[in-house]
Amino acid sequence: MEKKEKLIIAGALIAAALAGVLHYAHSNAVLAFVITAAALATLAMVVGDATEQLGKRLGPGATGILQSALGNLPELFVCIFALRAGLAQVVQAALIGSILGNSLLVFGLALFLGGLKNGRQVFHSGPPKMIVTLMILAFAALAVPTLTHMLHTQAEGHLNSLNIFVAIILLVLFAASTYFFLKGDKAIVAPHEEEKTTAAWPLPTTLIILGGAGVGAAFVSDWFVEALQPAMKSLGINQTFAGLVIVAIAGNAIENLVGIQLAVRNQSDYAVSVILNSSLQIALGLFPLLVLLSYFLGGAILSFVLAPMLVVSLALAVIVSAFIVFDGESIWMEGLALIGLYCLIAAAFWWG
Amino acid sequence: MEKKEKLIIAGALIAAALAGVLHYAHSNAVLAFVITAAALATLAMVVGDATEQLGKRLGPGATGILQSALGNLPELFVCIFALRAGLAQVVQAALIGSILGNSLLVFGLALFLGGLKNGRQVFHSGPPKMIVTLMILAFAALAVPTLTHMLHTQAEGHLNSLNIFVAIILLVLFAASTYFFLKGDKAIVAPHEEEKTTAAWPLPTTLIILGGAGVGAAFVSDWFVEALQPAMKSLGINQTFAGLVIVAIAGNAIENLVGIQLAVRNQSDYAVSVILNSSLQIALGLFPLLVLLSYFLGGAILSFVLAPMLVVSLALAVIVSAFIVFDGESIWMEGLALIGLYCLIAAAFWWG
Amino acid sequence: MEKKEKLIIAGALIAAALAGVLHYAHSNAVLAFVITAAALATLAMVVGDATEQLGKRLGPGATGILQSALGNLPELFVCIFALRAGLAQVVQAALIGSILGNSLLVFGLALFLGGLKNGRQVFHSGPPKMIVTLMILAFAALAVPTLTHMLHTQAEGHLNSLNIFVAIILLVLFAASTYFFLKGDKAIVAPHEEEKTTAAWPLPTTLIILGGAGVGAAFVSDWFVEALQPAMKSLGINQTFAGLVIVAIAGNAIENLVGIQLAVRNQSDYAVSVILNSSLQIALGLFPLLVLLSYFLGGAILSFVLAPMLVVSLALAVIVSAFIVFDGESIWMEGLALIGLYCLIAAAFWWG
């Protein structure tokens, strides 16, 4: 195990322990929220590292499936606890906020910092275009229930059936795209990072860490959701903004640093694939899974019918990022404009 | 005359005769509807073959004009009879449904089956991009009256004038694009299939078959429209869904098989041109022609003002297919996603 | 000074004098309006020529900044006087109308006439794609306040704050893009026309002409705005249409001829850059500047919240022009379709 990995595990342990203490001591809500968020972010990293280690024993195909299944585990826990607490609106906002955060803020930072460091950056290969095309298709599918509701079509009275049908179609596409990216044309699929393939943790260690981090993430997610409402109240932040910006950024913070680092290192194609693929997994996988699960959880029902402004923001983000990818080359100015657009959309939700 | 062509003519004759018997015998509505739909589809094929034969005597330019004029003849008849029966809503849905069917379902099947057979498919040349760009322009023009109506602008009180103005502009663009594809830059225009240019029917036979199929299509269209309403009622299908999915697929079924076959044979460029050009002809030609005709037919007036959900579905279909074409390469996964989107849109209209 | 330049200055002087006489003589409103519009257009050309001459003394970087700052000076004056006269609706329509006019009518004419003259035109280089990508981002930013208002989000009660925030973000992006186009990668930035760099006016002449034309433009703008309302009333034209079509075309007429001339001379890349950059400057610079200024002018407040139909028209124009640029090649047919779309949008506002 590398020193960096050990540090992350230690950090996650300390943060999780602190979060637990603050939770049971009913301490200051904002402090508890910040520490729990930090614990969640570091646990997400540990789950990511352990998944990768496990994958190495099982071959590259299995790694992909494991990463698809476990990569969003902490976010999944947070959303489940939030749904059980009746916070369907926060969950919707957090899911859309994760996509907006990836497609505008993180993508913008990657282009801006990458462009300042490396000048004009060129996308050579197919994967970014492919991902962005699938993202537009996913958006279109995701938008159908909200449009049905907004435009008061007759299907409005059958939204439950429509939700379930949409969820099943999206999960079929998720399965197909996971299969595609595993078995698909080598020229299209993004190359895996080569450097880390040598060192592997012992199998028992890997399993213990993965299990421990998973259980830990479940507990911390629960505390995070419980700390969310009082913290937001004492900061004067509304539910939608909390989900859209704060939960979304807390849930993806460290994962996103990877994409930005790749861009600064001038690996634009790979950076764009990592960043936008993360959006795609939420749209095709996490969101429909949670919609189906919500019918069994006994809390709030999660619907694909979103606040119109969320759908419109998503449309802007998807179209804008698609044009930037199809452009074939990027400049820091485009990154800055993406960041600006993210700030404007966030501002529009500030007065929720 | 080839054996296949003779078989089609025989099939059309038998189906049309059967449809006539069922019509005048007032038989079971669903059975009458299915047989009449089959008769219409085979007659459409006969009209297509006869038009092509006639064109060969007149040169390639005239073939194009004839195909533009006669290619949608059976659909034109169905729409005219439906308007006379007061079914303006069905006609609107059928026209938009034909575009959705081409741009999502048929295009999706072509990419999916072509991709499974041939792996990644690449679009080399200009025609698909050009057609898809014109389709976006056609959509924008088509959307103006509905937007005017939805957004309650002052022009709402002058929709008849706006409809006629839009129809004239679209028909001018249709004439210009027909001229362009006939006389235009050889590098842009899709090459015609070479194989069939040798054999030609005798001229009198061609004219008799063309005339007979045309008259037959007119009668069968009338029966089709009359069978439509009772059949839909006994199947529990609403008018919009009937037009959008059933009439649209029945009207284009065989024509569409050609595009899919081309994709499976790995002629992606040509397949995409055929499939998307069909959408373009409906948007620029058939729809505005019917709007103008409706003022003289004495039935329902056909308006460009569509149900908002139809316009939004059209927007999604046009944007999505544009990005797939601009992508420059296609994979079976994109085809599957298009089919999924078609199913979702159809589902949204199921509870009409 | 060249003969052509002298003629323009003489023409501007005569038109401005005539406009003054008609203004103070309270003559026929339509005649006064037409002459004042002509005076404004020629003064705009003089300001443009003088700015260019001044720039030559200061180097290419300063020219760009001067052109950004002074290029829209007459339009700025017209908008300021119109706001002081309480005509916020006309100003909004004129700003959006300038963008629509550039992106649809002028771009369409350039592609149509250029295509008829030169056949298929190809865009080789990056600038048109970059400008069109930034334009989509600018549209997205511009649309947020209107969407907030249309969709009745909670931010509706805080539109002043949102307007000011949007204006600041857009002006930051304007400053960044001006910096980028001045200092940026040479391969991306459009080359400056070489031919005119030899001859330069004497510095005092330049300053006197620039000052005189600026002051003249201020006066003529005032008369133009005063003549606008009675002229439109006697012609039966509503405020929105007047701003969207008449003020927008009058304000950009001569400037736009340059772009069309370049296209006819087969300099497609440069033509597209000039035409679309003009739209970008209005969206990122002139509009937010006027919004901020309107809080100090004591007249009507200019808001980013537009009539929904204006935003939708803008969306259609931006998407359509983006696809045409990304297409990489253009044909006269696409130009014709753009002109047709412009006519349809104008028609939708005719019955205001």
Image: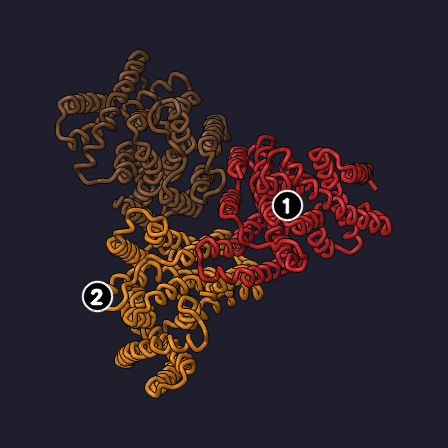
Chain colours: A red, B orange, C brown
Residue B289's quadrant in the figure? Answer: bottom left
Characterize the local packing of mark 2: few (<14), some (14-19) or many (20 or more) Cα atoms within 10 angstroms: few
Q: Closest to the observer: C335 or C149? A: C149
Q: Can residue B6 be seen in this view?
A: no
Q: Residue A326: x percent and y percent? A: 51, 46
Q: Which residue is drawn at 38% across and 35% down?
A: C279
- Quarter holding the N terminus of chain B is bottom left
Chain under numbered label 2: B
Q: Quick check: B85 above or below C325?
A: below
Q: Quick check: C276 above or below B117?
A: above
Give the number of the disc on residue A274.
1
Q: Closest to the observer: B94 or A117? A: B94
Circle 2 is placed at which residue position?
B296
Q: Residue C84: x percent and y percent? A: 31, 25
Do callouts 2 and 1 point to residues on the same chain? no
Q: Residue at x 39, y 25 (%)?
A: C295
Judge from the rendering whether residue A293 lies leftward or rightward of residue C242; answer left or right.
right
Calculate the distance from the C-alpha at mark 2 to the C-alpha at mark 1: 58 Å
Characterize the local packing of mark 1: few (<14), some (14-19) or many (20 or more) Cα atoms within 10 angstroms: many
Give the number of the disc on residue A159.
none
Residue C271's quadrant in the figure? Answer: top left
**Which amino acid type is marked by label 2?**
Phe
Judge from the rendering whether residue C30 lies leftward or rightward of residue B153; answer left or right.
left
